[in-house]
Amino acid sequence: MKTKWQPAVSFEMLLARARLLEKLRKFMNKHGILEVETPILVDAAVSDPHIESFETALQYPGGRHIRKHFLHTSPEYAMKRLLASGSGPIYQICRVFRDNEIGKYHNPEFTMLEWYRPEYDHHQLMDELDELLQVLNFKPAQKKTYAEVFKEKTDLDPHTTALVELQKTATDYGYTAQGDERSVLLDFIFSHCVCDHLGHECPHMIYDFPVVQSALARIRHSDPPVAERFELFIHGLEIANGFHELCDAGEQKKRFVQDNLQREKSGKPEVFIDEKFIEALKYGLPPCAGVAVGVDRLLMAMHHCTDIREVIAFPVDRA
Amino acid sequence: MGTFSTNEFKAGLKVMLDNDPCAILTNEYVKPGKGQAFNRVKLRNLKTGRVIERTFKSGDTLDAADVIDLEVQYLYNDGELWYFMNQENYEQYMAGEKAMEDTAQWIKGEELCTMTLWNGAPLTVSPPNFVVLEISDTDPGIRGDTATGGSKPAKLETGAVVKVPLFVEKGEKIRIDTRTGAYMSRA
């Protein structure tokens, strides 16, 4: 077999990527958001039960102390520590790493733009993201709630529909597994029946998620209660995920414990809770909103690509 | 026979689904950024030929199906069963009506066919992509008319009925694409 040493993309794509990064930085700069860098090599893995970290070992000179370390899957914890220490609005453009994710829309390492806005809620941050998209020549985005688009496509209310009914709908759409919890069934139905329809005429911002999908978002105790989380979709593809951030250290710790319980259930390794992050929350994370944008997917959306390998010079099979 | 996990699913892999042997056609990895990973898989049911789409939770498994493809030569039909021979070891196989459903009408003898065995028994037989057969009956041709695009039905020596151009005559041999049943040319 011939060694594939050449880049997988054209020079035009390299140029498009460089221009995009330039525009992102310019936008952030203009909006008074400070560029920061945080460690890629970290000592606590992400707890999210659906995300797997690459594990490595840190060796101190002399070879005596070896400590387990990980490649970060997102700069979130460290950036929140900066926010807690009073940084003000910050952004970062960095590589993040997620094991066991390879496909048309997934490369195990990818570029993320993540930014945080103290005093913003998720609506204000969606508006700022919309402004950024328009600078990149996208049409003005349309906001819709998760429940609204879910109902449009399935006639089901994601907040109140009983588990058995969700299971039945999932099975009807060809889902083979049984006995899953609510969150997994919602993931299946949303990704198979709803996503494809989003973001075709204009970008769609989907907000106010079911509480079982709150991740690191705060929960608003309305009727029904919702997670103040949003996702951006363009051409049916998820491009960004944002939160009105959870600032409560106690609640955050509870979610870590829950994550670990779920990891145990699905046979994944337990992760140590990042105490530095919890301590920062205890000290006080200012009320804020944050969003992570997949830069590779944004490039895909800008150039109507259908495979992430069309925008990465050396995707994993050539890395 | 063992099992395969979703990350081993690739085109051509033979697996058991709902008690039927299936061949995987495509396998797409689907994962929400903050959610469960899935594999959206297209499979062909090897018994019915139907294409189905199913979604598995990533990491789930399916049993392997004991399915192999053999190249065999068609020998004869005794009115009930069709007889084939594996040319490598001269082993004979008998296929019933069900396995021959779409194939019987294209073969008369000596053709090399692809036989799919499931648990050692013939599941389906595919004819060669192209066959040459004699026309046993058709309306008289319009001699010299090779320009107008009309067609007429023609019955072949195997009993199959295909559409042929108007100029083709009874007794002539023609070439057929068995995948579409279309007339290709005079042979």
Image: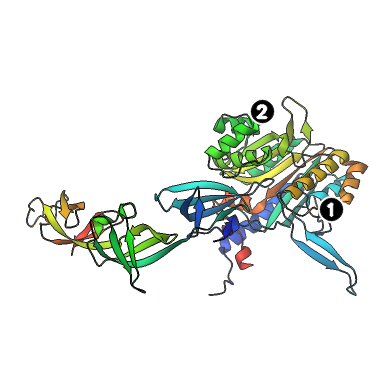
**Looking at the image, which residue is at 57% across and 60% down?**
B2
Q: Residue furthest top?
A: A223
Q: Chain of mark 2?
A: A
The residue under label 1 is which amino acid type? Phe
Instruction: Give the residue at x 70% y 56%.
Output: A98
Question: In this rendering, is residue A174 above or below B96?
Answer: above
Looking at the image, which is closer to me, A200 or A25? A200
Q: Nearer the viewer, residue A36 or B163?
A: B163
Task: Give the secondary structure at mark 1.
Answer: loop
For marks 2 and 1, give the CA distance. Answer: 34 Å
**Is any atom of residue A257 visible in this view?**
yes
Mark 1 surroundings within 10 Å by alpha-carbon count, few (fewer than 14), some (14 through 19), many (20 or more): some
Find residue A160 and name its label.
2
**Taking the image as drawn, is residue A202 in sight?**
no
Assign a secondary structure to mark 2. Answer: loop
Residue at 69% across, 56% down: A111
Rendered location of residue A176, percent (x, y): 57, 45
The quarter of the image holding the C terminus of chain B is bottom left
**Front one among B89 and A14:** B89
According to the picture, the residue beneath numbered tag 1 turns out to be A272
Q: Earlier in the sequence, mark 2 or mark 1?
A: 2
From the top left corner, tell me how far across and down residue A72 is, in percent: 77, 56
> Disc 2 residue type?
Thr
Q: Quadrant of residue A41?
A: bottom right
Name of the residue lying farthest toward the right: A283
Local crowd size for mark 2, using a 10 Å CA cut-off: few (<14), some (14–19), many (≥20): few
